[in-house]
Amino acid sequence: MAVDTYIEQARTRARSEQEAIAEMRDAYETFINRVQQLQPEQTPSSVAGLTTAGGVTHLSADASNTDGCRPVRRAFAETIRPHSVADIDQTESLLETIREEFTDAIAVALAPTTEASFTPDLKQMVLAEARSRKSEATALRKALEREEAHLDEAGAAIDNIIAWIVDANETPLTDLGFDALQQRHDTLASHRDRCEEVARDRQEFLRKTTNNSVDAGVRHRSLMPYLYQDFSVDHPVLATVARLTETCQGCQRTVRDHLVRRA
């Protein structure tokens, strides 16, 4: 008897995404190191730059034509952009990718048409945003590791039930006596209880959050559409458990029919 399971497919997806996020995190680390080595321009107030006052970011006018932000854009293009989810189709511009990964204000300040200087304030804002994105990537990687571990645990329970069903089906019900039929019915009931337990554990897992810091956390439930958007089901574990429960119920009905005839 075949029982559709999405667990192994989900495991593969979780592992591949862990690798992608690890590469993104490393890209942010490389970008941060490169920007840290850049010397900001000590410019007078008449030269453009990104400044912060009272919690509000301002972009001042610039009378010069220097492009002090070019090394920052180059560092971003060579490190973060190749791993940007928003840039997979290679249709968006570099500044659009910067806007997606950072903020509108930083993208505007780094634009060559803005002619902004790479001021100390701008440098710190870029570094702060990059560190924040790196922390988020670390939290996401940890959440994916927990997802894979949970898939392993749920998969082991499901595989055991499926293996029992496959083995039990090797013996026709007509070859079993009343006591053996009753035992099979009871075992199927136990398997249904185990399926319910796996489903409860999964729901509890989805309600949790993986944190990397005070500002970086990933709600497990939010991983589902992100991870499994290309799947035919939204929740691989719950869908598998639901189908397995239906299979056990069907087997029980068949066994009960035989029990009634033997009574």
Image: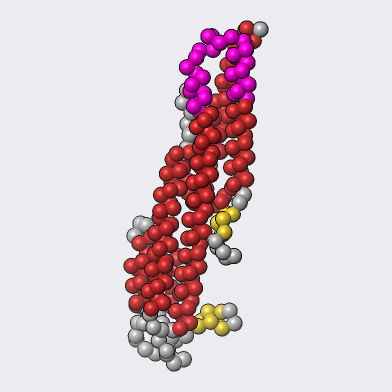
In the picture as drawn, the residue positioned furthest to the top comes out as 262
Pick the quarter of the image with the C terminus: top right
State the image coordinates of residue 229 (x, y, percent, origin top left): 47, 47
Residue 259, given in percent of the width and then of the height, sits at 62, 11
- Residue 131 percent coordinates (x, y): 48, 69
Residue 181 covered by magenta stretch: yes
Q: Is residue 115 visible?
A: no
Q: Is residue 146 above or below residue 127?
A: above
| Residue appearing at x 47%, y 49% in the figure | 227
Give the residue drawn at x 53%, y 40%.
153
Instruction: Name the main secondary structure of what is drawn in magenta.
Output: helix
Q: Residue at x 62, y 27 (%)?
A: 190
Q: Is residue 70 visible?
A: yes
Query: Which of these two is toward me, 225 or 214?
Result: 214
Q: Which region shows up in magenta?
A: 162-189
- Viewer-nearest residue: 65 or 221: 221
Q: Is residue 226 magenta?
A: no
